[in-house]
Image: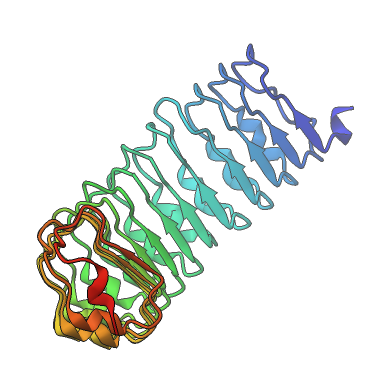
Amino acid sequence: MAKKLKILDLTCCNELTKTPDFLEFGKLEKLILAGCEQLSTIDSSIGKLKLLNTLNIEGCACLEGLPEEIGSLEYLSEIIMPCFGKSFKLPETLGDLKSLTKFEIQFHPGIYRLPYSIGMLNLTRLVLSNCKNLYELPDSIGELELLVELDLKLSGISVLPDSIGRLRNLKHLLLFGCENLHELPGSIGELESLVELDLELSGISILPNSIGRLMNFLHLSFSKCKNLHELPDFIEEQESLVDLDLSYSGISDLPYSIGRLKDLKHLLLSECKNLHELPNSIGELKSLIKLDLKLSGVSILPDSIERLKNLKHLLLLECKNLNDLPNSIGKLESLVELDLSLSGISISLILLEG
């Protein structure tokens, strides 16, 4: 029977501590060990499963790692990893899995390092989110020429290697909640395909000017970057930018050049307590639909705001320092939402006449 099996499902076999010898399972394509909570070892004979394409070890909290022999599985295209557990070893032979195009490890405190050989894979997606004890990536990460998404959200990453600049197909770099990460390497300016950079809740305090060379950004998020106090002038080069999220950040000033963002639709500045005014160039944002200044320190709006002909949402909730509105605000012909609740405005909406 074993010789003909294509699928072996041992889900929640809670007494299983080691997998069986797989020498007789030569036609096996899927091996499911999900929920085997006591499983600590996968037998080295797994290397004989030449047709295996899926390995599911989700929920195997006691598993100590993958065996070296796993590198022999040339058709293995999916490994469903455990989310929690003890110290977990990824062997150097992982790089031999040429059919593996995505690799995801989430919420695993036992991942301390990635094998250097990971750069040999044909990955398009690498997810290492919530790996709190993973502090750095190997230099070989730059060899992942096909990588489109690198997700390091809420990981322990404290530094990115310079080699990351060689990821010419990378479109999404997700660094949300990387509190240990305080700066980006200058080589990030080489990521010519990047359209999304998420630094929300990270420890970033300074941005390299090389980012100005990246011309394809659609979404930039620096939300909750408390250590970030100013945007460099490179922002003027991001003419394709649609969303700029600076909410809850330490931003105290916007560069005059922000007015060159002709495609910007959403400018989010809520809870920017250090921001007291906007540059006159804000009126050049012809595509702007939403300007969110909720709970910010803004005390005055420039007259140039009248030129925002497409602005639909102007949110000024709890802007305690804002005591007046410019008369020009009445010229915002597309405005459908004006939130002045709990703000410092003392004159009523008759200012909107005209």
Q: Can residue 260 be seen at all in this image of the molecule?
A: no
Against 15, is 68 above or below?
below
Q: Is residue 90 visible?
A: yes
Q: Is residue 118 left or right of residue 281?
A: right
Q: Position of residue 29 (x, y in %)?
A: 76, 42
Instruction: Work out whether 266 lies above or below 34.
Output: below
Write down the quadrant of residue 259 in the picture: bottom left
For residue 169, side relative to residue 340 (left or right)? right
Going by the image, does 111 lie left or right of 339?
right
142 over 86 or under it: above or below: below
**Residue 324 in the image: x percent, y percent?**
13, 69
| Residue 162 placement (x, y as % from top left) | 26, 66
Q: Position of residue 150 (x, y in %)?
A: 43, 58
- 143 or 238: nearer the viewer: 238
Q: Residue, x 60% and y 58% (percent of image)? A: 98
Q: Quadrant of the N terminus?
A: top right
Q: Quadrant location of the C terminus?
A: bottom left
Look at the picture and state if 3 lies above or below 164. Answer: above
Task: Report how many numbered discs are placed on residues in the image.
Answer: 0
Q: Quadrant of residue 182?
A: bottom left
Q: How is the protein colored in the picture?
A: rainbow
